[in-house]
Image: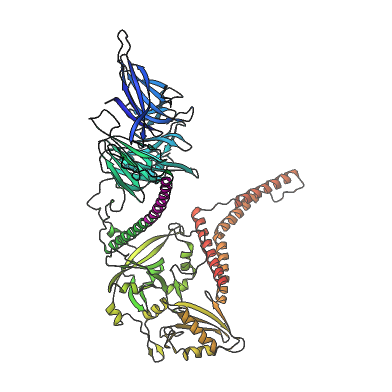
Amino acid sequence: MLVGEQFLSYNGEVLLFWLSNPKHVEGTADKTMNLCVRRMVFNRDTKLFVQKSSGVFSMRASHLKIEIICCSCTTDSRTGIILPCILMKKQKHNNVVKYLLLLLHSSNQFEQSFHFKLDYELKEDIRLFTGPSVLWRHANKLFYVSSKTCTVLSAPIQLSSVVWTGEIENEGAVVLGVRTACLSDSEDEDEFSTSDKAIWGSEFFGYAIETQKMQSGTCFMPHAYSRVVSSVYVCKNETLEKQLRISLVAVTHKNQLIWFQDGLPKDVCELPYEKPCTVKTAVTSTNDLLFIVSFASGNICVVQRRDSLQVASKWQKVKSVLVDDFIGSGSEQLLLLFKDDSSTDVLSIFEITDLGGVNYASGINYKHDVPTPEGLQENGLLTIRALEKRLQAGCTSVRELQQHLGLKKRVILQSCRALLDLVEGRTHVLPPAKEEGLVSLWDDVENPPRSLNKEISSSPDIPEHFIKKLWQRVVGDNLVVGVELTELFYLSLSDVSLSLVMDQHFSSISPVIKCRNKIMKLNKAFSALSVSSSQIEPPPKKMKMDLHSKNDPKKEFPKRYSKVQLDGAKTVIAVTNLSPLLAFHRVSCIVLLHAKKQKHRDDGLQESKKLAVLCGKILLSLEDISSGKYSVKMLRNNSYCTGSVEDILAVLAVSVRFSFQIVSSDCTLTPVNSWLLGEMECTPFKECHDNIFCHKAGNVYGTVFNWTLKNPFEGVLTLFCRNLTVLFQCLHSLIRVLPPTCDVKFLRSGSKGVFTEQLALALEKEMLTSRSSFFSKESKAKSSLTWQSEQKISDVPVDSSLDSEEGVQQFRKKLQNEREVCALSMNQTMNGALYRKAALKAAEAQLSTDMTVWRLSKS
């Protein structure tokens, strides 16, 4: 066994450093110690390491103890060439320790770069980096010395550990360390990192050696990992749009390897052994990125990153592991040197591998291998590598897509289960972090926290009896669920909608049923205001009217647009497809009402509070549908249609509304009414006689009509049809009975004349609002002006004359007073609350005008 042996890989060679004692010559007082180096290369013919060259560096060792501290490959700042560096220690009897940093050139000549003396020994976080430079930690302080200064410098920071040292783009050499959290009000950091530091009591920080600047550690990792991370390897760093982007891996005291991307954890892998020490990387011939983790026990494991982090291989009783291109293939391999006390040859037991096609091990006879022609072998190798890369890229894309879809599915199902538990008042228990592929920073607590469902579900703002009726109907292949609300409760809400959630737990499907919502009312025109995503509305406005919620003004507008239209709209309806539900034979659904409750404050503004109210449950089964329990019943009785209000609303909910303006210049439009009552076999509803139901057999059955005459020569026909086929059939039948001179025009959103009148009213309202908003302030200014003018003018003598000097002076004084009063009246200020109230009223009036103009342009 050699004294103080150290291994280092350099340009595919294995450098072996050790100390030797030459024979002492009698009669000489000084002793010498030799630092020896041996360059070893791998012979692909014999599959063994052979010596290429060697070198010696002699040092005086009189009354000294010499040791090799560490060795590494760093950049010589004079030439920019990477050279092997060796840090040596000479310890004297008076506790003065001298350190030397040596450079090894290609000629095996050693060069002393610099030396320095300390009154203590280097033991903690010793690193060699560009310069060459030496960095270490002592007494929770950071020290460093370089070939440029040759003087030991101290960084003005306190730290508990150094986890990484390396080069960062545009920053030079950077140290990533851990220190006690520094919390101050002057720190320019986001709220998350500040609270993170306060919770854990420690933080990551970066320190640039050259510029002596501090950097935030959140671009590397969250501060929460500062207590568990022991070593870090930065795989990639770059600056994009003045923002530092970093990819790295870290090993933790919890035997984990974690992949971080831009400061966030992306993947985690459990390590097979305890107490991981260091981590480094290797890029193989197939472009696979391998992470080599070394443990304190001398074990090694390799983690492979493709679709996820997985342990690919592991070894025990490893003396050293090196990464380089040892076989000259153009890619990196791992060289594992194993412990062997029975042999004096340090490279007697080894293994070279890239976990792929390269695998050489000592003690194996390779004579049976039959070499192939070099040209064919090279072409075949290139072809295989290209095919492997294409296959791996395709497999990686498929796996990433599957993993992404699986994660979305788990999140949706977990959210649905939490929603069900919240509605039913049960305690929702989150799954362990490992099952969800997350990293747990503390031990999982078996007992879940106390549920707050009761506090959430109970709200004093909700009246005890806010629901008049909950009903359901089946219309064709649609399930219609309606909730009739009390008028006072409904008028205080906005953004009202319903959700249907299956009460049963299914592991493979989402319990939330996709449905579309409508708010319905019954009047002469059968108006239906839809709040679903398919509602036709103008482009969104830039101003937000609700300062305490993130509502879009276009969603708030329908409530403010026409009070008459919404006063009667008290039934909220949800429509969903019936066929998927029948696959379960019997379904129980929970009906949830979602809305925002508006509250008006003293300053005229309004704030909203989100509500999720349980309206009840509905049951659906094949037996009920087969027996017609929830079918719509539209029967004739004494020339009237006897359908209930719920039946009418259900038919309208599954129908699409179309309006047509019919104008006849030569004759009256009496044939339209005859066509409806005769050929279409329509009968009016008892609840609203102006609306009629079609009883004609065929596709047109169930269509609802509304015929409104503006004058004998002009009218508007509104149809509620199931689909466009029914609409075309009705129009085809209508055109045959209309006079040839009739003009039929499709109205996109209503009558053009009505919108013209509404536009005039909206403009008038906007003008009055703008005038009245500042009327009170203007009145105050005028009264102040009048009072001050009277006060100033009263001081002027009545008999003053401009002919005398005294009269001129009095007139000048009067004129100056009037100027001051005018200036004061022009510089009137307004209270902030009054201004916000005035601005809110003006904006509401402008929104009403813009909506009317848009509807008029679409008609």
Q: Provide the residue span drawn in magenta.
A: 376-399
The rendered magenta stretch, by its main secondary structure, is classed as helix
Q: Residue furthest right?
A: 803
Q: Does the magenta portion include 787?
A: no
Q: Is residue 100 found left or right of 422 in the rendered image? A: right
For the residue pair 421 and 52, the one nearer the viewer reads as 52
Vertical side of 21 occupied by 658: above or below: below
Q: Is residue 136 visible?
A: no
* Location of residue 468 (image quadrant): bottom left
Q: Residue at x 72, y 44 (%)?
A: 806
Quadrant of the drawing holding the N terminus: top left
Query: In which quadrant of the rendered view does residue 303 lie?
Result: top left
Nearer the observer, 775 or 240? 240
Q: On screen, 611 above or below 687?
A: above
Asked if residue 389 lies in the magenta stretch, the reply is yes
- Where's residue 261, x and y in %? 40, 46
Residue 210 in the image: x percent, y percent? 46, 31
Q: Quadrant of the C terminus?
A: bottom right
The picture places residue 447, in percent across and down from the top left corner, at: 22, 52
